[in-house]
Amino acid sequence: MRRLPRVDDIVLIAGLFRALVRRELDALAAGGPPPATEEPVRTELVRAASWRAARSGLDGELIDPVEGVPRPARTVVGRMLEELRPQLEESGDWALVSSLAGRTLADGGSAARQREAFRRGGRLTDVVDLLLEETRSGNRRLAAAGR
């Protein structure tokens, strides 16, 4: 399992997940099939898309879930945000989630930051130091916010 050292990354994923669940529940309540089941996707394609995402992260291409073809991560994430905007606005999460997504896309994911730390210093301890610092800074921000 990959670790997410930054609290902001966890908040971003939680916000997106909540919006996805809300969208599916809204579709069920309206009496129609949820959007995710309109066209079944073969298990091996889901595995391949997951492998690609784990390997490339936000630096490469992701499989566009609508078209089923590789697209730049920025494009896929941008489309997902726009599609989930009604649910994110309804929950009051739009400003935070869209801001965090923009920053994450600009900064790169944790894997990219770890690779860069290793490239700069050439030691695995540099990667560990980065992870510790990112975790500590997130914890300090939470403590300052009284959470």
Image: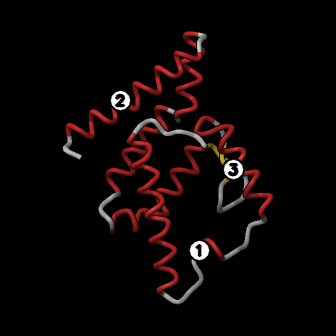
- Location of residue 89 with respect to 30 vertically, above or below: above
Query: Looking at the picture, how far across and down is residue 73, in whole percent?
Result: 59, 44
- Location of residue 126 with respect to 138 vertically, above or below: above
Which residue in the protein does label 2 denote?
A: 136
Which mark lies nearer to you, 1 or 3? 3
CA–CA distance in space, label 2 to label 1: 39 Å
Query: Farthest residue toward the bottom?
Result: 31
* Numbered badge on residue 50: 3
Residue closest to the eye, 55 or 128: 128
Q: Is tag 2's residue or tag 1's residue first in the polypeptide sequence?
A: 1
Identify which amino acid the numbered label 3 is placed on: Ser
The residue tagged with tag 1: helix, strand or loop? Answer: helix
Where the N terminus falls, by quadrant? Answer: top right
The structure residue drawn at horizontal position 57% and vertical position 29%, both measured from the top left corner, is 112
| Location of residue 102 (image quadrant) | top left
| Location of residue 121 (image quadrant) | top right
* Numbered badge on residue 54: none
